[in-house]
Amino acid sequence: MSASSSSSDDNNNEYNSDEAADVPTPSGVACLQINKVLARAEETAGEFTFGGQADMLPVAPGLFVDGKSPFGRKHETLIDENVRKGWQLESGRVEFKNPLWHSGMEKLSTTIANRLGYEGTPLQCVLYKLLVYGEGGHFTKHKDTEKEDGMIATLVLQPPNLHEGGDLVVYRDTTTEYRHDFGKKDATAAYLPHYAVHYADAEHALENVTKGYRLALVYSICLPRTVRQLRRNHCQSLSEEKSIEELGSGALKGIDRARFHALEEASNAVMTDKKLCFYIAQLSHEIEFRDDNIDMVFVRWWSTLESQHL
C-alpha cells in the first residue's frame, strides 16, 4: 500500500512512497529523528530464542521425585494424546539434592537475562514441571499459557539422556523456525545438560521421539517481584494480554522492549513540556472486497478502556 498526501510539498509529508518497492518511507523531520532512535534499539534487543550446552550445571543434578500428561486450554486441564503424548510430574514432587545444581541455575539465570536483553535484571527461573516422553512422545504447535505472575519466557532444561528425535522447534513467523536438538547433532546429549529458551508467546512444538526416552525440566522465566509491582508514571496502556495490563511497559519483550526504552530515554532528555506520553494499543487494519469492485479499508485501534477509535 502506498502512502499519499493531498499536499504537493513533500517536505510537509510525514511519509513518501517508493512506488518501485511500494513501501512508505519517513521524510518528516520528526519521523526521521524517531526512526534513528528506533534503529538503535536493534543493538539492545534480546534474542528471540537460543540455547546450547549448559556447562554451568552439573551432569548429575541429584534429581529425586516423589498419569497422563495434560495440555492447557485457557485455565482448563485436558488430556488428548493427539496434542501431547507424554508424562509429567508437578514441581512440588521434584527435588534437586546436588547443591551445585542450584548455584549453576543462578549462573544460567544471569546468562538468560543478558541474552533476553534484561542485563542487570535478576530474572527468576521457577520450576514448572518435569516431562518424560517415550517413543512417539510429542506435542503439537502451541503457545505457552502464563504459569506465573510476570512470566516472560520459558526455559527447557534437558539433563543427560539418550534418545532419538524429540527436537524442539520454535516458530517466529510463517517463514522462520529455530531448531533445538539438545546436543544430539554433536553426540553430547547423553553426557551433558543442554537448554533452550524462547519467549512465552512464541509458537513451538516438540517433534516425535523415535527411540528411547526424553526427560526435560520446564521452567517459567519471570521478572523479579520488584519489577512486577513497578508502576511507571506513563499514561495508562492497553494490551490484549493480562500480563501487560498488570505490568504496563514492564511486560514488553524483545525488540518491543528495546524500542520502548530507546524512546523513553529520548523523551527523558527533552524539556518537560516536550516529553512524550506513551500508549500501548491494538491496531486492526481490514480490507474488504465487494462484488461492485469497491474496496473498503477499515483502520481501528482500541484504548485502555477498550473503546474503539477510527
Image: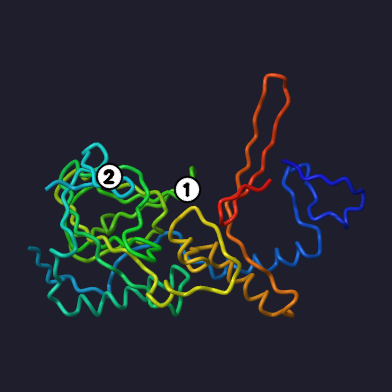
Describe the element under mark 1 as helix, strand or loop: loop
Q: Amino acid at mark 1?
A: Thr
User: Which residue lies at the image location 47% right of the left edge and 66% below the top edge?
Assistant: 247
Residue 176 image label: 1
In the image, residue 277 lies at what x, y percent?
66, 68
Q: Is residue 127 above or below residue 141?
A: below
Quadrant where the N terminus lies?
top right
Describe the element under mark 2 as helix, strand or loop: strand
Count of numbered circles on the image: 2
Q: CA distance from mark 1 to mark 2?
A: 19 Å
Q: Quadrant for residue 155, please give it.
A: bottom left
Q: Amino acid at mark 2?
A: Phe
In the image, residue 4 lies at what x, y percent?
81, 44
Quadrant where the C terminus lies?
top right
**Label 1 neighbour load within 10 Å: few <14, some 14-19, many 20+:** few
User: Which residue lies at the image location 29% right of the left edge and 55% below the top edge?
Assistant: 185
Residue 139 image label: 2
Residue closest to the eye, 307 or 275: 307
Left or right of 81 on screen, residue 238: right
User: For the residues carrying marks 1 and 2, which lies nearer the camera in this image?
Assistant: 2
Q: Is residue 274 above or below residue 144?
A: below
Q: Quadrant for residue 125, please give it.
A: bottom left
